[in-house]
Amino acid sequence: MNKVIGIDISKQKFDACFLDGKTQTSDVFTNDQDGFKRLTGFITNLDIVVMEATGPYFLKLATYLFERGYQVSVVNPLVIKHYSRMKLSRAKTDKKDAYLIACYGLGENPPLWKAQQEYIMQINQELSVLESFDKQITMIKNQLEALGVLPYCDKVALNALKTALATIEKQSIKLEQHLQGIEATHCQNAYDALKTIPGIGPKASLLLIAITGNFQKFSTSRQLISYLGLSPRIYQSGTSVKGKSHICKMGMAKARKTLYMCSWTAKFYNPQCKELYQRLKEKGKAERVIKIAIANKLVRMAFAVGKNLSTYEKNYRTNVCF
């Protein structure tokens, strides 16, 4: 029987549990090229390596194994957490976690993982840095405004802030230009298609392309909506428990925030979103609820347009209700 290898990974090391249904062995490896190479001496291309998506720490090992033809499965840490509770596990150690991950892989047969293309990783990283720059620019501008109302303003502090602001703004422009180059080289058609949707701007278009792997990662819009954490969560039981419905928020907070901001524009300039806004407003829905519904609709539009490389149709109608 082929082995299932459970990996519990951290910054400096990872624990591996080798499970073949009958026997169990464990070992510890360094989280670097030497440790990766040593691990491959214990496994074959028929074995399955299962690990959690633990921040950025799993990516090097997962990519290393994937590029060498090994089968890799990356699981949401929340899934393993609930699996551990289901098993009534009391211990919490790296070795025990690796064993639980291996048991999950053996019993649940999770889907195999594929490494992202290099340009998708570039877009993700550069968008993340741009978001950080935007926050720093806002922070510095607020500090400059605060210094301006003081009775005495220190020139050294003022010049330091102005220099930092100019540097960050210059680097931000360079990143945006580089992103435009990536878009023109690898995903021009999908980018141009998404920009035809009123409410979806350049940054939102690139973010959707990065999340979806240029619309190759998901087969339906429902899967994408669920991944983003925009799907509704209903809490009901029997006749007495009727909790308030809300979105699950299990997905990417950054993407939800961007799409929520897009809904502000879409409710004025996107005919279908404008109609949806008016209809839900007449029903007495809260503004935030309406904006989430518009964001959900924008994702459906973006998926259809990006997947088919078509353009937005103003008079297109679907049977989807909100």
Image: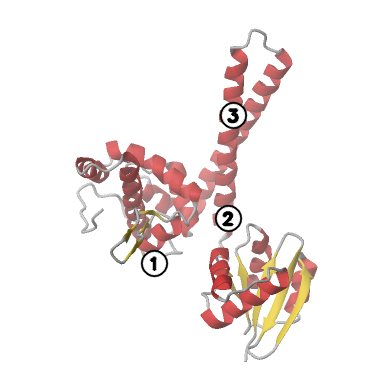
Q: Residue at x 63, y 83 (%)?
A: 47
- In-front residue for pair 2/23: 23
Q: Residue at x 60, y 43 (%)?
A: 129
Q: Marks 3 and 1: which is nearer the front?
A: 3
Check disc 1 and give the amino acid type: Ser
> Can residue 318 be seen from the camera position used here?
yes
Q: Residue furthest front?
A: 240
Q: Quadrant of the N terminus?
A: bottom right
Q: Residues within 10 Å of mark 3 (few under 14, many from 20)?
A: few
- Residue corresponding to mark 3: 139
Disc 2/disc 1 C-alpha distance (Å): 21 Å
> Can residue 114 be seen from the camera position used here?
no
Q: Marks 3 and 2: which is nearer the front?
A: 3
Give the x, y percent position of residue 233. Answer: 37, 58
**Mark 3 or mark 2, which has the lower sequence index?**
2
**Mark 2 or mark 1, which has the lower sequence index?**
2
Instruction: Please tell me in which quadrant of the rendered image residue 195 appears.
Output: top left
Q: Secondary structure at mark 1?
A: loop
Q: Residues within 10 Å of mark 1 (few under 14, many from 20)?
A: few
- Residue corresponding to mark 1: 219
Decide if residue 313 is on the left or right side of residue 166: left
In contact (CB < 8 Å): disc 2 and disc 1:
no
